[in-house]
Image (cartoon, rainbow, N blue to C red):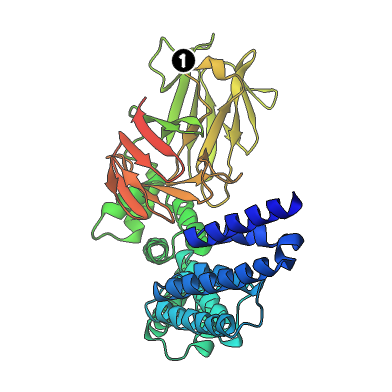
Amino acid sequence: MLVTRRRIELKRIANLIRQGLLREAARSLREPQIRAHRDGCRLALRLVEALCDRAEGHLQAGELTEAIDDLQLAAQFASGDKRVVALKRRAEQQAYEQARRWLAEGAPQRAVELIDALSLRRVGSSDLDMLRHAARHWVEGRRHCVHHRFGAAVAAFRRARRLLPDVPRLQSEFEEAQELQARCGQLEEELTRAYQEREWFRVRQVAEQLLALCPGHELAVAARDRVWRELGGSLYAAVRCKRGSLAAVQRSGESGTHPRRGGKAHLWQVLIDGGGHYLLTTAPEIVIGNEHGDADVRLLAPVGSRHIRIERDREGYVLVPQRPAWVNGRQVVSPLALRDGATIELARGVGFTFRLPSYLSRTALLVPTVRSVFRHRLDAVVLVARVCLLGEGRHCHLFVPDRRQLTLVVEDPSDQRFLLRTEGELLVNGTACGGEARFVPPARIELPSTRIVFAHA
C-alpha cells in the first residue's frame, strides 16, 4: 500500500514538471521518502534542468530576480551543478550591466532597487556593492536638492562621483548643485549686509530671491518677518511700487495705512478632507460679535453685535474691547496686547484661545473654547499675516494629513491672490501645477493624500 502511494506521488510530480509547475514539484520532492527513492533522484535532475531552462529564458527577457529565484531553487537539489553555477555568474554580470545602464540613464533609484532585491536573495559581488553605494549617494543628493539643502547635496554627489567618475548625468547634477549652493551663499551674504545696514526694502527683495531659490529658508523667512515688523502694513504698498524711497515707505508705515484697514474683511472657509475646518482672513483686523450685527466673525452666543476687535500691528496683536471682555481671567477695559496661549472670554463659556504656532510667521489662530458658538463646525479662525503653514506639525497653522509641509503665501491681500508651495505635485481646480500654484478663491486643491477647498464664508 505504501509503495503504491509512493508511485502515485512520483507520477504526480512528473506531471507537475511536465506542466511547468516547478515550485509545487520542488515542494513535493523535498520529502525525504520521495527524494531518497531512485525515481525521485531522477525527477530531481529533471527538475533542475527545467529550472535552468526557465532561468535562462528569464535572463534573456531581462527578468533577473525571477531567474535568480529559479537558480536558487535548483541549487537546493544540485548545488554544484555546472550549469547552475554558470547561470548564476551570468545573472550577476547581467545585473551589473543593467545597473550601469540605469545609472548612465540617470535612474539611480532603479539601480538601488535591483541590487537590493538581489542582495535579499544572497546574490552579490564587490562590483555590485560599489554600484549600490554610488547609487544611494546619488539618490541622497537628489533628496537634499528637493529639500533645498544644497550643501548636503553637493557632499552626497561628490561621494557618488568618487565611485562613478565617468557618468555625465551625475557630473551635470553635481555642477548644478554647486551653482545653487554658491548662489544661495551669495544671497545669504547680501541679505546679512542689508540686514545689518537696516535697508529694509533691499532686505525684502533679497529675502524673496532667496525664498524663490530655497523655499522655507529660515534666515529669509525671519528677515521677511522683521521687514513686516519694521514697515508695518505699508509693506504691500511698497511691493507694488515700481520706484519709491525707503523713507516714503517708512512714512506711510508710520501713518498705519493698509489696503484692508477700515473695510469689511474677506473671509474664506477652508475645508480639509481628514483635517480641519477653518475660517481664514487676510485682513489686519477683524470684529467679533453676534449673528445679528455686521461683525466679521459672528457667534451664536449672547454677545454684542461688535463685541471685540482684534488688530495686527508692528509688534503683534492687540485686543480692543467694545463690550466687556476678559483675557486670562482679567477684565479688559483698554487695548491689550495678546500673547501666545492667552484665553479670551466674551461671555460665560464663550471665548477663544489665542495661539501663535510658529515663530517664523505672525499668523495667529483663534481656537474656540466651545465650537457650537458657530453655525457650522469650526476648528479655528486663522488671521493670516503673509505666510501660513499647513501640515501635521505643532508649528503648523492648518492641520493637513500629509507628511509634507505646505506653505500658503498671500501675494496680494487686496485681490486675494494666494501662492501655495509644496514638495510634490498638486492640482488646482483640476489643473496640474507642479510644486507651486497661484490661485484666487474659491478653489479646490488636490494633494496625493487629501483635498483642500477654499470657499466663500
Residue at image point 23% right, 59% down: 242
Residue bearing mark 1: 375
Q: Quadrant of residue 295?
A: top left
SS label for mark 1: loop
When the figure is inspected, residue 67 is found, relative to residue 439, above or below; the finding is below
When the figure is inspected, residue 165 is found, relative to residue 256, above or below; the finding is below
Q: Quadrant of residue 177?
A: bottom left
Residue at image point 45% right, 65% down: 146
> Between residues 322 and 223, which one lies in front from this camera angle?
223
When the figure is inspected, residue 52 is found, relative to residue 368, above or below; the finding is below
Evaluate whether residue 320 shows in this view. Answer: yes
Q: Is 400 on the left or on the right of 416, as rendered?
A: right
Evaluate whether residue 192 shows in this view. Answer: no
Furthest residue toward left: 242
Q: Position of residue 200 (x, y in %)?
A: 42, 61
> Between residues 397 and 429, which one lies in front from this camera angle?
429
Residue at image point 56% right, 44% down: 392
* Total numbered labels: 1
Q: Quadrant of residue 199?
A: bottom left
Position of the C terminus, as image quadrant, is: top left
Residue at image point 46% right, 91% down: 165
Q: Position of residue 139 (x, y in %)?
A: 50, 72
Q: Position of residue 117 (x, y in %)?
A: 56, 68
